[in-house]
Image (cartoon, coloured by chain):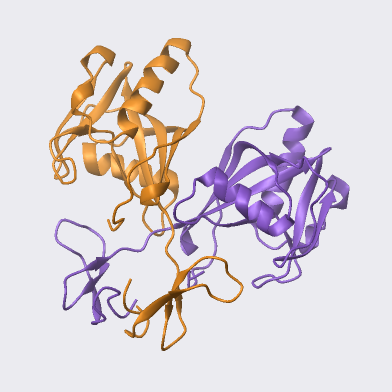
Chain colours: A purple, B orange
Amino acid sequence: MKFCSDCGSKVEKRIPEGDNLERDCCTHCDSIHYSNPRVIVGTLPIKDNKVLLCKRAIQPRYGLWTLPAGFLENGETVEHGAFRETKEETSTEVEMGKLYAIFNIPQIHQVYMLYLANVVKNDFSETPESLEVKLFNENEIPWDELAFPFVPIVLKKYFQDEKKGEYPLSTQTIERPARNTNQ
Amino acid sequence: MKFCSDCGSKVEKRIPEGDNLERDCCTHCDSIHYSNPRVIVGTLPIKDNKVLLCKRAIQPRYGLWTLPAGFLENGETVEHGAFRETKEETSTEVEMGKLYAIFNIPQIHQVYMLYLANVVKNDFSETPESLEVKLFNENEIPWDELAFPFVPIVLKKYFQDEKKGEYPLSTQTIERPARNTNQ
């Protein structure tokens, strides 16, 4: 941030009174601009012990496989965001299950919240965001063509949990190099 | 948002290509500025079945009682944010437990993530953010002086769960009138 989004003047980084972290503070109107982590919501959509994956039709990681997930939007709940993202990326309306995995990616200011979901219709298909949408069993997963670090972690967890018949919530932290975190 | 934080020019609300929601788009440099929900992290700090509450020394809700919680900051995990906020508001370093309650407050673009925590030291005390910090059993809770809607909900849940000895994660949505969501 270089300019104040309220008045257009320059901002400077300083610690506001009563705070203990540097913020973007306007040099003219005294607005304080906070930057906080974003929530990514998504699902692990299941049908007959197979997982529905999407081949990305957009950057980053075009052409690689992922689970349906995206940024939580203002005005929606985490479950609804996960449902919406799943529909946007797979066309199908899943039956939402329990919160299954949380991933902290602190360097890029992201928190993932992934839900189990049941694929209850056969209408999943490619979308503007997905070149291909397909069910995979454990042996068919394209392990070398997964888009993001969280994907193999949560897939391995699922196939292990599936053998035990128990699906506890897990929380993990993924270390990544810092980068620009604009969407 | 009225001005572009990258170049200081005016922004306009429009739906960017490939998107389906209105965003703040710069009329000069084409930057797109996203606004997303914020995460509030906190704890339900317990000692001998009593809950540690804080009497707020800051606005909003000055003088009312709450659980320690605050905005997740860039660069930290949800658990660490909850631990940090608890220390900032109670002085004590709790032993973190499991994720216990999620609250969606979609109208004000907030997601609460509250953890169970054990109070393991007796060094809790007032802080710059809390006029008073005190343990309450169920009969002592100042039910008419609680700061936010989530506080009685999670306190009632805890005292019910405590009788059963089971502490499942719950997710609830709190409806509130929309307001300016700056911190």
B80 w.r.t. B101: above or below: below
Residue B33 x %, y %: 43, 72
A170 w.r.t. B36: above or below: above
Residue A29 x %, y %: 16, 74
Residue in view at x 71 percent, y 71 percent:
A62
Q: Is residue B13 visible?
A: yes
Q: Quadrant of the C terminus of chain B?
A: bottom left
Q: Residue furthest bottom?
A: B28
Q: Quadrant of the N terminus of chain B?
A: bottom left
Left/right placement of residue B36 relative to residue A26 reads right
A177 w.r.t. B145: above or below: below
Left/right placement of residue B29 relative to residue A3 reads right
Residue B35 x %, y %: 42, 63
Q: In the figure, residue B50 lies in which quadrant?
A: top left
Q: Residue furthest right?
A: A139
Residue A86 x %, y %: 67, 52
Number of marks in the image? 0
Residue in view at x 31 percent, y 33 percent:
B149
Residue in view at x 68 percent, y 70 percent:
A61
Front in this rendered view, residue B178 or B173: B178
Q: In the figure, residue B90 lies in which quadrant?
A: top left
Q: In the figure, residue B53 lies in which quadrant?
A: top left
Q: Is residue A172 visible?
A: no
Residue in view at x 38 percent, y 39 percent:
B175
